[in-house]
């Protein structure tokens, strides 16, 4: 019987799916106890051909493709879990590359009872070769950009509110329910919120590591964080107790708009807006200067502040728009 089922939702991932499958093949966990289930959202590129080529050249690792006609991540996860035969489920992403001992460490943490859903930290890598991609990857692991998200910043092993991807026993789904298909993103955070509500533990172990490729352009980054903000607002309406200070970007962006409007009639609002803008720009400059000096890359002085501001305003705008649409 298969012990571990690795599930991967994907859509049009011809550039990265082979890298993920190669990393899974290189796992230290016994290959005969692994299976890979790719939930494909009806890809229109060469994703299926890349998977087929891998299957042909690596017959020792069982890889199955199941269709995800809804083309959304939570539906793909549910389809893959239903097809899984393993006692343990390890979720991965087509943009990720797990360390060779990733599966072994996840299973060990589950077997020792460290948590009901366990995961590790991301090593953010650039999604491209230019200064923009490098700046975005740097911002995606900077405290000013991501707050106190431990899976991006690292730290000691501890109970956390969420982990990227996650590994859990198949029986956990029977206990807390399936991934919520009404959320187009934040489905993992919502799943973890239900685990914690049920008295379970979400555990982050920094020895569990995977590389994750960030977006390669500011436009892609803005679209990604707008979605994050939009669906985070939907989730917080159901689980208000999961609010974290790092999610104040919505209030921050709204304050710019409100003060700008009030400044038309009230001079004090204009002065307050100028102060807020000044403090914000100073914070961005210091963040950019810090990483530029540490890594000796002048482009980061401009690129990192642009990326962090893009993350803040895209996330905050999506969050506000979601609240308005309610």
Image (spheres, rainbow, N blue to C red):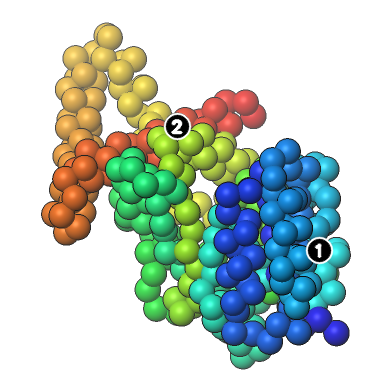
Q: In the picture provided, is 210 more to the left or to the right than 297?
A: right
Q: Which quarter of the picture shows residue 176? A: bottom right
Q: In the picture provided, is 11 more to the left or to the right than 208?
A: right
* Residue 141 in sight: yes
Location of the N terminus by quadrant is bottom right
Residue furthest out toward the top = 265
Query: The residue tagged with tag 2: helix, strand or loop?
Result: helix
Disc on the earlier residue, 1 or 2: 1
Residue furthest out toward the bottom = 112
* Residue 182 in sight: no
Location of the C terminus by quadrant is top right
Image x and y of residue 90, in percent: 67, 71
Q: Which disc, if any, is residue 64?
A: 1
Query: The residue tagged with tag 1: helix, strand or loop?
Result: strand
Q: Nearer the viewer, residue 44 or 197?
A: 44
Q: Nearer the viewer, residue 243 or 131?
A: 131
Distance between the alpha carbons at the discs numbered 1 and 2: 34 Å
- Classed neighbour count for the residue bearing mark 2: other residues with Cα under 10 Å, few (<14), some (14–19), many (≥20): few
For the point 62% across and 59% down, the residue is 18
Image x and y of residue 256, in percent: 33, 26
Image x and y of residue 284, in percent: 23, 42
Q: Nearer the viewer, residue 129 or 159?
A: 129
Residue 134 lies, with reference to residue 35, above or below; the image says above
For the point 40% across and 35% down, the residue is 218
Q: In the picture provided, is 228 more to the left or to the right than 193?
A: left
Q: Nearer the viewer, residue 199 or 26?
A: 26
- Classed neighbour count for the residue bearing mark 1: other residues with Cα under 10 Å, few (<14), some (14–19), many (≥20): some
Count the labels in the image.
2
Q: Which residue is identified by label 2?
A: 219
């Amino acid at each position: 019987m298969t012990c571990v089922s690795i599930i991967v939702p994907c859509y049009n991932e011809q550039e990265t799916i082979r890298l993920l499958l190669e990393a899974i093949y290189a796992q230290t966990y016994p290959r005969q106890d692994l299976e890979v289930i790719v939930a494909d959202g009806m890809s229109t590129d060469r994703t299926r051909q890349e998977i087929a080529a891998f299957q042909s050249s690596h017959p020792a690792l069982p890889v199955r493709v199941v269709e995800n006609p809804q083309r959304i991540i939570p539906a793909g996860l549910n389809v893959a879990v239903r097809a899984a035969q393993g006692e343990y489920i390890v979720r991965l992403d087509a943009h990720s590359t797990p360390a060779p001992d990733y599966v072994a460490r996840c299973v060990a943490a589950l077997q020792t009872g460290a948590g009901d859903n366990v995961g590790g930290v991301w090593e953010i890598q650039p999604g491209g070769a230019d200064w923009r991609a490098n700046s975005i990857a740097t911002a995606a692991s900077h405290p000013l950009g991501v707050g106190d998200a431990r899976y991006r910043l690292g730290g000691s092993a501890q109970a956390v509110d969420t982990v990227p991807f996650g590994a859990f026993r198949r029986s956990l789904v029977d206990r807390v329910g399936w991934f919520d298909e009404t959320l187009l993103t934040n489905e993992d955070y919502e799943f973890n919120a239900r685990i914690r509500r049920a008295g379970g533990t979400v555990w982050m172990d920094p020895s569990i590591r995977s590389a994750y490729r960030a977006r390669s352009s500011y436009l892609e980054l803005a679209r990604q964080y707008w979605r994050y903000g939009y669906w985070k607002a939907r989730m917080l309406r159901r689980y208000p107790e999961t609010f974290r200070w790092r999610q104040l970007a919505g209030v921050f962006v709204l304050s710019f708009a409100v003060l700008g409007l009030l400044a038309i009639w009230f001079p004090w609002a204009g002065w307050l807006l100028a102060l807020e803008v000044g403090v914000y720009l100073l914070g961005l400059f210091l963040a950019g200067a810090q990483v530029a000096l540490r890594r000796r890359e002048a482009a980061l002085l401009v690129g990192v502040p642009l990326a962090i501001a893009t993350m803040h305003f895209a996330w905050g705008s999506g969050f506000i728009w979601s609240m308005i649409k309610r």
